[in-house]
Image (cartoon, helix red, strand yellow):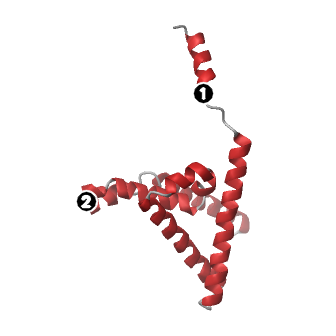
Amino acid sequence: MEIKKYKELVLKYKPKEHRFLNGLIAFVTGGIIGALGEILTECYSYYLNISSKDAASFMLVTLIFIACLFTALGFFDKLVSICRCGLIIPITGFAHSMMSAGMEYRKEGPVFGIGSNVFKLAGSVILYGVVSAWFFGTIRYVIMGG
């Protein structure tokens, strides 16, 4: 088969991507996650009588726990297929990637399995986060003069 005919055949059967719809779904679900985070922060602040800063830490732990729980129960991947990047981009996606890797390698033991592989997917996020923080911190230090 000629390369040109093959490419035409592939394009004919390739699923169409709906970028606007995917973006809209991600925007709405990301907004729902943000609203849920704000509700949790306000509830923790009010009912536990703590500052908003401390309540935000509790909210993050809660969202991470929910994402890990849903990953362990097998719900998270199904939700991502519906919600798209609205669930992957926030901290819930980071928790999901670490939990998935930990679950996949748990049979190899706590050190060589979970400990060695839990950062496989999340390692690049941590690396670039640290390097970016150092880079922008240095720029701020130079501009602000210490």
Q: Residue 101: percent from the left, percent from the top? A: 39, 54
Q: What element carries label 2?
A: loop
Q: Residue 14 carries which label?
A: 1
112 vs 96, left or right, is left
For label 2, the residue is: 109
Q: Residue 63: percent from the left, percent from the top? A: 55, 69
Query: From what the image shows, is residue 66 above or below residue 71?
Result: below
Question: Residue 46's quadrant in the figure?
Answer: bottom right
Q: Distance between the residues labelled 1 and 2?
A: 41 Å
Badge 2: residue crowd in 10 Å (few <14, some 14–19, many ≥20): few
Question: Residue 129's quadrant in the figure?
Answer: bottom right
Seen at 72% across and 68% down, the residue is 144
Q: Is mark 1 on a helix, strand or loop?
A: loop
Q: Which mark is nearer the camera, 1 or 2?
A: 1
Mark nearer the N terminus (1 vs 2): 1
Query: From what the image shows, is residue 32 above or below residue 10?
Result: below
95 vs 32, left or right, is left
Mark 1–mark 2 CB contact (< 8 Å): no
Three-letter residue code for mark 1: Lys
Seen at 70% across and 62% down, the residue is 31
